[in-house]
């Protein structure tokens, strides 16, 4: 179903970043985060979005999707994490250190080691650009990075139940329980570690209701919004 969401693509993305010559400015390396209600089409939209954006990427880059499962696999490979860290310029490493310091000093519970590693990995991937990061608080972690566009997908419970039933072959009761557990976990993760409300509209550039807009049109809408946003950002810098 999501043929371009797999570990092989993620490994190739990291390898490509190592082979790209020349330091390009952050604004030239766009990234996208997708936060979503369970069953609102996060992976499907991400998959289609990567396909729509690819023609607008430099020849040596490929839009790559990292969802929470793939980020976990990246974390399990310490060598891969080290390679990602090597790609960061010193200025970015400094900003990342400041972010982690604020997190540890906040009134929220101290981040466990795996959470800190997740934060570092997401930051590194976003800084490198041409990635679509689905979940794991990526929108909050990368909020201060100027090259990242943030999206939230929502939808009615009834439509989301239907999607979960179809994708996972659940009955209605199991689908409702799964949606509740997933949405509660995402909400608590952002609240506990970052003190942020996942439903706050001000932390997103764009919020889309996938009840009213198809997944295909949602991906096109996001792609157009990102491309226009990049043009506006570029024009503002010229001024």
Image (cartoon, helix red, strand yellow):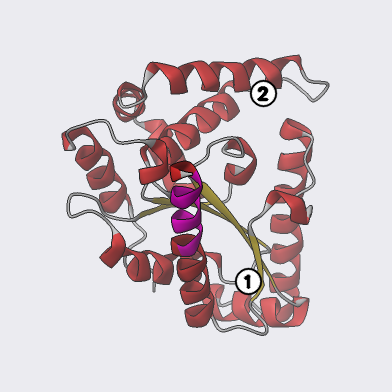
**Where does residue 67 sit, x and y in percent of width and height?**
48, 52
Work out which quarter of the rendered image holds the N terminus and state it.
Answer: bottom left
Question: Magenta stretch mostly in which secondary structure?
Answer: helix
In this view, the residue in front, 146 or 219, is 146
Q: Is residue 211 left or right of residue 49?
A: right
Q: N-terminal of the two: label 1 or label 2?
A: 1
> Cβ–Cβ below 8 Å for labels 1 and 2?
no
User: Could you say which quadrant of the image residue 21 lies in?
Assistant: top left
Which class describes the residues within 10 Å of circle 2: few (<14), some (14-19), or many (20+)? some
**Where does residue 176 sit, x and y in percent of width and height?**
75, 71
Q: Residue furthest right?
A: 107
Identify whether 111 is placed above or below 197.
Answer: above
Q: What separation in Å lies between label 1 and label 2 (alpha carbons)? A: 28 Å
* Residue at the spot 46% in from the left edge and 75% down from the top edge: 220
Q: Is residue 87 left or right of residue 186?
A: left
For label 1, the residue is 40
Q: Is residue 132 magenta?
A: no
For label 2, the residue is 111
User: Could you say which quadrant of the image residue 101 lies in?
Assistant: top right
Which class describes the residues within 10 Å of circle 1: few (<14), some (14-19), or many (20+)? many
Q: Is residue 2 left or right of residue 112?
A: left
Query: For the image shown, how many numbered marks are present on the structure?
Result: 2
Q: Secondary structure at mark 2?
A: loop
Q: Secondary structure at mark 1?
A: loop
**Where does residue 46 sit, x and y in percent of width and height?**
46, 64
User: Magenta part of the protein: which range?
Assistant: 228-236
**Where does residue 81 sit, x and y in percent of width and height?**
36, 27
Identify whether 20 is placed above or below 113.
Answer: below
Q: Is residue 229 magenta?
A: yes
Q: Residue furthest front?
A: 239
Residue 67 appears anywhere in the view: no
* Residue at the spot 36% in from the left edge and 35% down from the top edge: 25
């Amino acid at each position: 179903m999501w043929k371009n969401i797999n570990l092989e693509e993620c490994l190739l993305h990291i390898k490509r970043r190592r082979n790209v010559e020349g330091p390009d400015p952050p604004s030239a390396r766009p990234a996208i985060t997708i936060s979503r209600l369970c069953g609102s089409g996060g992976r499907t939209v991400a998959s289609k979005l990567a396909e729509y954006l690819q023609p607008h990427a430099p020849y040596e880059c490929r839009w790559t999707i990292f969802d929470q499962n793939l980020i976990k696999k990246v974390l399990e490979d310490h060598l891969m994490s080290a390679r990602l860290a090597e790609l960061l310029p010193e200025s970015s490493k400094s900003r990342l250190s400041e972010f982690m310091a604020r997190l540890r000093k906040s009134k929220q519970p101290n981040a466990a080691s795996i959470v800190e590693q997740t934060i570092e990995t997401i930051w590194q991937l976003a800084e490198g650009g041409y990635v679509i990061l689905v979940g794991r608080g990526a929108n909050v972690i990368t909020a201060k990075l100027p090259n990242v566009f943030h999206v939230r997908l929502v939808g009615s419970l009834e439509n989301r139940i239907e999607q979960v039933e179809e994708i996972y072959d659940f009955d209605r009761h199991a689908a409702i329980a799964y949606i509740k557990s997933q949405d509660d976990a995402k909400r608590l993760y952002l609240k506990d570690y970052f003190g942020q409300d996942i439903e706050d509209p001000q932390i997103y550039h764009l919020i889309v209701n996938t009840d009213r807009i198809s997944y295909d049109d949602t991906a096109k809408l996001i792609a157009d919004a990102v491309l226009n946003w990049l043009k506006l950002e570029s024009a503002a810098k010229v001024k």
